[in-house]
Image (cartoon, grey):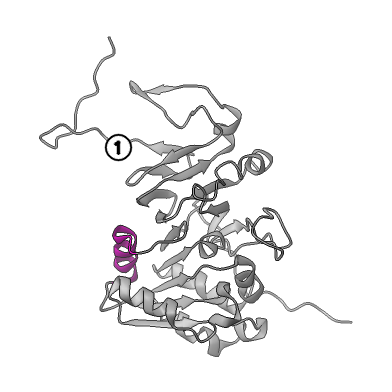
Amino acid sequence: MAFAQQSPITVKKSPTRHGPEKGSLLIIGGNVGSQRDIWDKFTELAGGKDKAFVVVVTTAAGDSAAFDQKAVDEVKKQTGIKNAVLLHTSDFKEANSEKFIAPIKKATAVYFEGGRQWHIADSYLNTLTHQAFIDLLDRGGVIAGSSAGASIIGSFLWRGDTKGAQVEIGDHTQGLGFLKNSAIDQHILVRNREFALVDFIRKAPQLIGLGLNEATAVLVQRDTLQVLGKSYVAIYDYNTIINNGEKHVVNNREDFTASNGPFFFLGAGQKYDLAKRQVIQEPRRNKNNNVAKTESSN
């Protein structure tokens, strides 16, 4: 009688609802280009250009990227980081070997290149490599990914079908789960995808949905999300969907999370509490850079 191999993944209880208890996630909506605030934040979180050691995972791009240093060279060019190496396999057994994960054990950062997210799932899901990525977060490192490399960071793998990205719920539905209880879409505005996650989140209220446009990212540390880049991130929350159209005022300020649609956008610098499912309202400041008093309503 044959028995399935036991997964080496250790699932730990965490006080956070969605984000990692330690370390950082930098989730990018594709075509990051030379967007400075995103790359500078990645470099900072990786330990600085002189101390960082980055593992660039090219698996999503398919077997043609197994020896192609293009993605590694791009990371080096944009960050100034000297130490960056390529990691690629389509062999599940290789991903379960100590030899293969040796670079990850030394790394301060991982960067997932774009392509097709199901390639990453097929190669690394529930392997020693998967555990090594989790261990990197646990020691305070950063995991970043763009496009397909963004979607794989979620727990539910959105657009993971082998037939094509037009299939939203397909034959691969499990992501690597660094962002717990989540589904992540990308390229949302340039590809008219902004409504794609609405019905799914309506049926799966325990999940948070993130939709990122290109050259835009979210930084997640514990349960705090902050937007970077030049465009917008859509937040899909069950309560926003079912309360569609209701308006609220908090401290004399409109709570724009209750939008006229079933989701809302956040722009660069804005923050969101993933645990409380609410926008973090930063104090207003006057011209002298002092916190302004809340004005009374007339």
Q: Position of residue 213 (x, y in %)?
A: 46, 51
Depth check, front residue: 263 or 103:
263
Q: Is residue 38 magenta?
A: yes
Secondary-structure class at tag 1? loop
- The residue tagged 1 is 282
Highlighted magenta segment, given as a residue range = 34-47
Q: Is residue 121 left or right of residue 103?
A: right
Residue most toward the top? Answer: 298
Instruction: Point out the image quarter for the N terminus.
Output: bottom right
Instruction: Point out the image quarter for the C terminus.
Output: top left
Please identify the quarter of the rendering in which residue 155 is found: bottom right
Asked if residue 218 is positioned above or below residue 161 in the image, the reply reads above
Asked if residue 98 is positioned above or below residue 160 in the image, the reply reads below
Depth check, front residue: 190 or 13:
190
Q: Is residue 108 left or right of residue 262?
A: left
Q: Is residue 271 magenta?
A: no
Q: Position of residue 119 (x, y in %)?
A: 63, 72
- Are there few (<14), some (14-19), or many (20+) residues within 10 Å of tag 1? few
Q: Name the residue located 51 percent from the left edge and 27 percent from the top edge.
A: 260
Depth check, front residue: 216 or 14:
216
Q: Position of residue 264 (x, y in %)?
A: 48, 36
Q: Name the residue located 27 percent from the left edge and 72 percent from the top edge.
A: 48
Q: Main secondary structure of the magenta part?
A: helix
Q: Name the residue located 54 percent from the left edge and 84 percent from the top edge.
A: 66
Q: Is residue 162 left or right of residue 88?
A: right
Residue most toward the left? Answer: 288
Please identify the quarter of the rendering in which residue 50 is found: bottom left
Identity, as a three-letter code, of the amino acid under mark 1: Glu
Asked if residue 115 is positioned above or below residue 259 in the image, the reply reads below
